[in-house]
Image: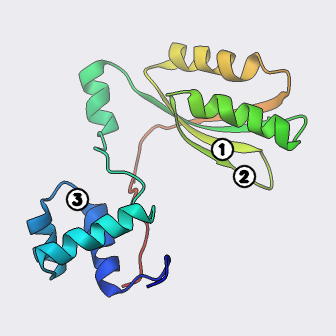
């Protein structure tokens, strides 16, 4: 099997893992209609190929906000004056190092980056904005949209049936 060829069992495993990666190998094998040994071998191969990037706990933002105080989610567009690869790479590197930046996309056309940012409150967002954008002379424009309500969040990738 070449590195990127997946069969029906692989897709079943990937779909099941996207729904709940915490189940035991025995439970996963049963749900995927595979033997436990085959299941373990296939999942190990999917990880080694890099198709499974990592397994994490996804925290509920609204419930966490209630537990720790506030929560503010912002969608941020960033446009640079100079778009040479060295300028894009420099800002991207700073964005990747910032824990409040949950997602970072280079996009085209339009802004150079679109970010999903999560901070505790507006003062924390203002501090982040000053640190990342105001201090950078190459940042031409920052446009921020603040989330009033998260209607849907699903990190699963659609897979062939």
Vertical order, 97 against 109 (above or below): above
* Image point (73%, 32%), residue name: 91
Earlier residue among tags 1 and 2: 2
Element type where label 2 sits in the image: loop
Element type where label 3 sits in the image: loop
The answer to whether the residue labelled 2 contacts the one labelled 3, judged by CB atoms less than 8 Å apart, is no
Q: Nearer the viewer, residue 77 or 80?
A: 80
The residue at which mark 1 appears reads as: 114
Quadrant position of residue 83: top right
- Where is residue 147? Give x, y as percent: 49, 38
The residue at which mark 2 appears reads as: 107
The residue at which mark 3 appears reads as: 20
Element type where label 1 sits in the image: strand
Q: Which mark is residue 133?
A: none
Q: Nearer the viewer, residue 52 or 68?
A: 52
Callout 1: 10 Å neighbours few (<14), some, many (20+)? Answer: many
Quadrant position of residue 90: top right
Q: Nearer the viewer, mark 2 or mark 3?
A: 3
* Image point (77%, 55%), residue name: 108
- Where is residue 153? Give x, y as percent: 39, 52
The answer to whether the residue labelled 1 contacts the one labelled 2, judged by CB atoms less than 8 Å apart, is yes
- Where is residue 71? Give x, y as percent: 40, 26
Q: Nearer the viewer, residue 149 or 161?
A: 161
Q: What's the distance in space between the residues labelled 2 and 3, CA to CA? A: 31 Å
Callout count: 3
- Where is residue 142? Give x, y as percent: 74, 31
Earlier residue among tags 2 and 3: 3
Q: Quadrant of the C terminus?
A: bottom left
Q: What's the distance in space between the residues labelled 3 and 1, CA to CA? A: 28 Å
* Image point (56%, 27%), residue name: 98
């Amino acid at each position: 099997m070449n590195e990127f060829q997946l069969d029906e069992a692989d897709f079943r495993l990937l779909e099941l893992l996207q729904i709940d990666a915490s189940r035991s190998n025995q439970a996963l094998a049963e749900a995927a209609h595979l033997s436990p040994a085959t299941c373990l071998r296939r999942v190990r191969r999917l990880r080694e190929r890099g198709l499974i990037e990592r397994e994490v706990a996804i925290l509920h933002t609204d419930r966490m906000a209630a537990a720790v105080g506030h929560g503010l989610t912002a969608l941020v567009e960033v446009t640079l004056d100079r778009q040479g690869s060295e300028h894009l790479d420099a800002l991207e590197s700073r964005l990747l190092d910032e824990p409040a930046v949950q997602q970072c996309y280079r996009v085209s056309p339009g802004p150079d980056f679109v970010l999903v940012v999560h901070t505790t409150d507006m003062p924390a967002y203002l501090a982040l904005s000053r640190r990342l954008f105001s201090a950078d002379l190459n940042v031409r424009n920052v446009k921020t949209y603040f989330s009033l309500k998260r209607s849907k969040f699903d990190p699963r990738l659609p897979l062939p049936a």
